[in-house]
Image (spheres, helix red, strand yellow):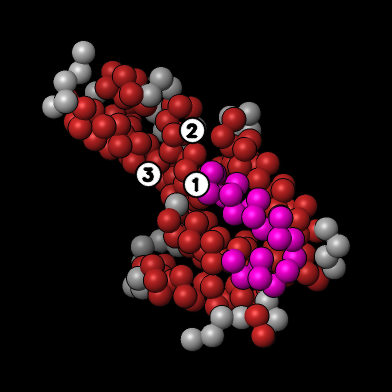
């Protein structure tokens, strides 16, 4: 039976393995990452990984569930508010916060989601995206649909998917890395708001 002294170390090991798994899944790819690789990078044995997580799929689920749950909540709130400017303004801020707070998980979902079909947590994420698409397309003009798609996909690319293509020496990546998350948030909210909100609904400084 675990003692009070062993519980913090076990929780720490679980967190370290989860963080390492997410980093490896996002950079190497889920398919290309083995449990042994995760163990090696985290400094644990493979048996330790399996003690905390029964499989690679279990690690994936634990790694991206917080991001998917946040996505489900904000998509549900947006769908309920539909296309009002107030709902869009709240959604923009929350979406950018999601990108910044769950960067690796979103990177993984955006870039590899299509190849991870059948995994329950990934299917939940795909379902949330479909709800968002339905909310956007309901009664919207084609131009509105395109503006929303370009704005959200562009924001995601700038912070998340772009990391796949921009190397460490790329000036775009260096420019992004030179700014704080607060500066990035302000810039992204401004840009997305320019695309999605009328002038009287945009944030002002």
205 over 179 or under it: above or below: below
Residue identifier under label 1: 67
- Tell me the distance, in whole angstroms, between the alpha carbons under discs 2 and 1: 10 Å
Magenta segment includes 154: no
Name the side, left or right, on which 91 lies relative to 84.
left
Residue identifier under label 3: 23
In the rendered image, residue 205, in percent from the top left (x then y), is placed at: 49, 86
Can residue 165 be seen?
no
152 over 32 or under it: above or below: below
Magenta segment includes 81: yes
Instruction: Look at the magenta stretch and give its main secondary structure.
Output: helix
Residue identifier under label 2: 61
Helix, strand or loop at mark 1 = helix
Residue drawn 72% across the image and 48% down it: 131
Highlighted range, magenta: 68-90
In the rendered image, residue 45, in percent from the top left (x then y), is placed at: 24, 23
Which image quadrant is residue 51 in?
A: top left
Which image quadrant is residue 35 in?
A: top left
Nearer the N terminus, badge 3 or badge 1? 3
- Tell me the distance, in whole angstroms, between the alpha carbons under discs 3 and 1: 14 Å
In the rendered image, residue 161, in percent from the top left (x then y), is placed at: 52, 56
């Amino acid at each position: 039976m675990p003692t009070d002294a062993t519980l913090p170390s076990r929780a720490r090991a679980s967190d370290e393995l989860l963080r390492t798994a997410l980093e490896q899944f996002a950079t190497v790819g889920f398919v290309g990452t083995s449990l042994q690789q995760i163990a090696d990078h985290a400094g644990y044995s493979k048996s330790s990984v399996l003690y905390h997580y029964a499989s690679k799929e279990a690690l994936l689920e634990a790694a991206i569930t917080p991001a998917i749950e946040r996505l489900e909540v904000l998509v549900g709130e947006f769908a309920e508010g539909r296309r009002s400017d107030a709902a869009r303004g709240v959604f923009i801020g929350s979406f950018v916060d999601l990108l910044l707070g769950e960067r690796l998980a979103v990177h993984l979902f955006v870039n590899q989601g299509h190849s991870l079909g059948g995994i329950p947590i990934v299917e939940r994420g795909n379902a949330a995206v479909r709800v968002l698409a339905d909310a956007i397309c309901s009664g919207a003009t084609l131009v509105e649909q395109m503006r929303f798609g370009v704005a959200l996909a562009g924001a995601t690319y700038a912070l998340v998917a772009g990391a796949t293509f921009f190397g460490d020496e790329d000036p775009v990546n260096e420019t992004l890395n030179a700014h704080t998350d607060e500066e990035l948030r302000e810039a992204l909210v401004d840009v997305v708001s320019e695309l999605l909100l009328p002038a009287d609904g945009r944030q002002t400084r």
